[in-house]
Amino acid sequence: MQATNRGLTLLELLIAISIAAILIAIVIPPMQGMIAGARIAFAINGLASLMTYARSEAITRNRRITLCPTTDRKACAGAADWKHGAMVFADHNGNRRRDDDELLLKYRSTNGRLEIFSGSSPDESGRSRKRVVFSPSGSAAGYTISIRFCAPGNAAPARILLLQNSGRIRLSERESDGSRPDCGA
């Protein structure tokens, strides 16, 4: 008995394409939220790790260590926008700026697709924290900071990384008043 190779009819092909399109339409939106959530989690873990490193170096070196956002690995950024990366350096003269003779201890890039900022907006340059200075005791006295992590279009819930005066780091999904973080979208 000889088998015949018939192939697909046009109607069968259209039905298969329609089913595939429906499945893609159902799967893609939740997947985008899941991907955005994973990006936020990765960015939070990276910045929390950098904070922990800076605190540890302050204790180990017995000197003030500064953590700040940066766009070029050379100077602290002027705004409270952390999405381009952050650096850790030993601030020998205490001016809270990285000078040419001060060694860059560590740099970490962050996901530029996210909005990562302290203060009420990424462009704010007023009262928002633009750096954190850890003392030799490991505390960040006077440098309490809340850093928001927001996905474009609010594809995933915003998260807040909090650093307290004691140097303790914690994660929150709520502002101090119990409201959800505002990402300005």
Image: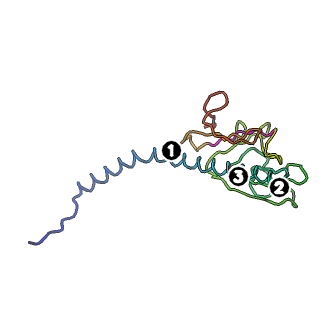
Viewer-side residue, 41 vs 148 = 41
Please give the range of residues in magenta: 142-149
Asked if residue 105 is positioned above or below residue 181 in the image, the reply reads below
Local secondary structure at mark 3: helix
Viewer-side residue, 155 vs 174 = 174
Q: Earlier in the sequence, mark 3 or mark 1?
A: 1
Q: Earlier in the sequence, mark 2 or mark 3?
A: 3
Asked if residue 183 is positioned above or below residue 82 in the image, the reply reads above
Asked if residue 78 is positioned above or below residue 108 in the image, the reply reads above
Question: Residue 33, which numbered label?
Answer: 1
Which circle, 1 or 2, is nearer the viewer?
2
Q: Is residue 85 magenta?
A: no
Local secondary structure at mark 2: helix
Residue in the picture at 85% in, 59% down: 102
Label 1 environment density (alpha carbons within 10 Å; few <14, some 14–19, many ≥20): some
Q: Position of residue 136 (x, y in %)?
A: 83, 48
Question: Residue 61, which numbered label?
Answer: 2
Q: Quadrant of the C terminus?
A: top right
- Name the quadrant containing residue 160: top right
Q: Amino acid at mark 1?
A: Gly
